């Protein structure tokens, strides 16, 4: 559970447990109408990070 203080348009909460990272995006619907696009972008970045080899 996370708490978002007042006057915050977008907040990110991350939880790592047992080798799994979960992220939640919380946004004000009127001030961030493009939340679905932001969520897709964040997912794409996570996909890129997890598919990149560290060169070992």
Image (cartoon, rainbow, N blue to C red):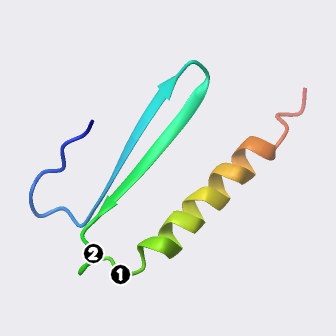
Q: Is residue 55 left or right of residue 41?
A: right
| Residue at horizontal 23 percent and vertical 81 percent from the top | 30
Disc sitting over residue 29 in the figure: 2
Q: Residue 4, how many percent across, how many down?
A: 18, 50
Disc sitting over residue 21 in the figure: none
Q: Secondary structure at mark 1?
A: loop
Q: Secondary structure at mark 2?
A: loop
Image quadrant in which the C terminus is located:
top right
Q: Nearer the viewer, residue 54 or 34?
A: 34
Task: Please rate how many residues cluster around mark 1, counting C-alpha atoms within 10 Å: few if below 14, some from 14 to 19, many from 20.
Answer: few
Task: Please rate how many residues cluster around mark 2, counting C-alpha atoms within 10 Å: few if below 14, some from 14 to 19, many from 20.
Answer: few
| Residue at horizontal 42 percent and vertical 79 percent from the top | 34
Q: Is residue 25 left or right of residue 51?
A: left
Image quadrant assignment for residue 18: top right
Disc sitting over residue 33 in the figure: 1
| Residue at horizontal 11 percent and vertical 64 percent from the top | 7
| Residue at horizontal 61 percent and vertical 57 percent from the top | 43
- Is the C-beta separation of discs 1 and 2 under 8 Å? yes
Q: Residue 38, how many percent across, how many down?
A: 49, 69
Image quadrant in which the N terminus is located:
top left
Please identify the residue farthest to the right as the structure is shown: 56
Image quadrant assignment for residue 31: bottom left
């Amino acid at each position: 559970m996370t708490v978002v203080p007042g006057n915050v348009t977008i907040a990110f909460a991350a939880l790592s447990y047992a080798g799994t990272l979960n992220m939640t995006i919380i946004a004000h619907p009127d001030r961030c109408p493009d939340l679905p696009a932001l969520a897709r972008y964040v997912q794409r970045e996570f996909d890129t990070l997890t598919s990149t080899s560290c060169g070992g």
